[in-house]
Image (cartoon, rainbow, N blue to C red):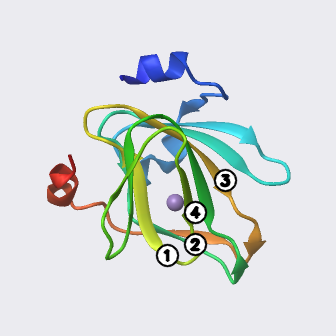
């Protein structure tokens, strides 16, 4: 699936190219706010091969992030762990203060809804890119 096909089937607001976070991604992504009230919720779409850098959703209490996979095929990996392949309908519960990345598979676009779990002292720390050699090993 390419990004145009993914956009055409997007249930929620597809949004615009994610230029404000581009420095924290390899490849092109798109960000569509679903709700900025109550629980901040965003539609995130990735072109094939696009993934974000390693990052940490810090929080003192609560916090973390939930991903609801809506289209395509992608990956989620925690630091020191194996990458988990993601398909539509999958849910990822990302604890606070855990280093991780998420993004598309190399050969298809990918989309997830990102729910920013409310908490105190929440702040995202962006780290290094995913090692391209490690990413390229993913099937
Ligand atoms: Mn995250």
SS for callout 2: loop
Q: CA distance from mark 3 to mark 1?
A: 16 Å
SS for callout 3: strand
Residue at 31 percent of width and 41 percent of height: 105
Q: CA distance from mark 1 to mark 2?
A: 6 Å
Which residue in the protein does label 2 denote? 95
The response on whether ligand 1 sits within 8 Å of label 1 is no
Q: CA distance from mark 3 to mark 4?
A: 10 Å
Marks 2 and 4 in Cβ contact (< 8 Å): yes
- Label located before the other in sequence (3 or 2): 2
SS for callout 1: loop
SS for callout 4: strand
Q: Can residue 69 be seen at all in this image of the molecule? A: yes
Query: Label 1 neighbourhood size at 10 Å, few (<14), some (14-19), many (20+)?
Result: some
Asked which quadrant contains residue 61, the reply is bottom right
- Label located before the other in sequence (3 or 4): 4
């Amino acid at each position: 699936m390419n990004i145009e096909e993914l956009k055409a089937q997007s249930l929620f607001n597809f949004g615009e190219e994610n230029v404000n976070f581009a420095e924290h991604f390899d490849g092109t992504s798109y960000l569509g706010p679903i709700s900025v009230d109550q629980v901040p919720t965003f539609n995130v779409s990735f072109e094939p091969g696009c993934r974000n850098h390693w990052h940490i959703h810090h929080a003192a209490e609560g916090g973390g992030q939930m991903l609801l996979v809506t289209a395509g095929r992608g990956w989620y990996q925690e630091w020191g762990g194996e990458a988990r392949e993601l398909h539509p309908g999958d849910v990822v519960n990302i604890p606070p203060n855990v280093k991780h990345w998420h993004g598309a598979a190399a050969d298809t676009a990918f989309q997830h809804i990102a729910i920013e779990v409310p908490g105190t002292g929440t702040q995202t720390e962006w780290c290094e890119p995913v090692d391209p050699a490690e990413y390229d090993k993913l099937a």
